[in-house]
Image (tube, grey):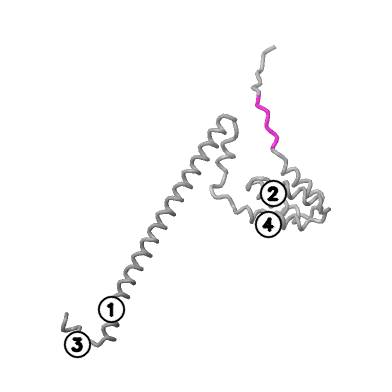
Amino acid sequence: MDTLLERLSSSQIVAVISIVVGGIVTVVTIFSLTKYQLQSLADDTALKREKQQAELTLRTKMLEHAKTSGASLDALLALDSTPPDLDEQNAELAKRFGMLESSPDEIERTLTRAMALDANRKQTIINVIDELIESGADHEPILAAVRGLCSPPVPREKEVPVSVTGV
């Protein structure tokens, strides 16, 4: 080693030291980036797991609520596991309402009510407006139909069994 250092000039020694230190820095950087990516992957996996647990808990509570309140399980099963982006749906609603020729106050009131609904009912309203516009319906009846869709559903009366008695 001493003979190697004796043969090299001072600038060559600095170059060798720079190469060795640069190699060490490169190895440490690669190690750090790999460790960061693995930690990021672990965090992402944990976050997805927590999200799945929360969705499972929510669905379980919804089923329990449906069981106790007598709500329709068909309506719960029809729920989409990934609801559409609400901003996109609200934008679509606003576009549809913007096509209507009515008083701005009436459009604003109805649009506000429609935007407060769940994703499935919003999509229904968008489809209804599209179909009514295509069929050439006037704008006031379209708003009236949408207001009807914005109302909460009327609960069905429990069916009473009818008994037939002999006379």
Asked if marks 3 and 4 touch (Cβ < 8 Å), the reply is: no
> Given the image, on which type of amino acid does mark 2 rest?
Met
Return the residue at label 1: 17
Q: Secondary structure at mark 4?
A: helix
Separation of residues labelled 2 and 1 (CA atoms): 67 Å
Asked if marks 2 and 1 touch (Cβ < 8 Å), the reply is: no
Separation of residues labelled 1 and 3 (CA atoms): 15 Å
Where 104 sits versus 57, above or below?
below
Disc number lying in front (2 or 1): 1
> Given the image, on which type of amino acid does mark 3 rest?
Arg
Disc 3 or 4, which lies upstream in sequence? 3
Write the start and end of the magenta stretch as one range. Answer: 153-159
Return the residue at label 3: 7
For the residue pair 36 and 67, the one nearer the viewer reads as 36
Majority secondary structure of magenta residues: loop
Residue at position x 67%, y 31% in the image: 156
> Given the image, on which type of amino acid does mark 4 rest?
Ala
Disc number lying in front (2 or 3): 3
Disc number lying in front (1 or 4): 1
Instruction: Residue 91: give its label.
Output: 4
Return the residue at label 2: 115
For the residue pair 26 and 47, the one nearer the viewer reads as 26
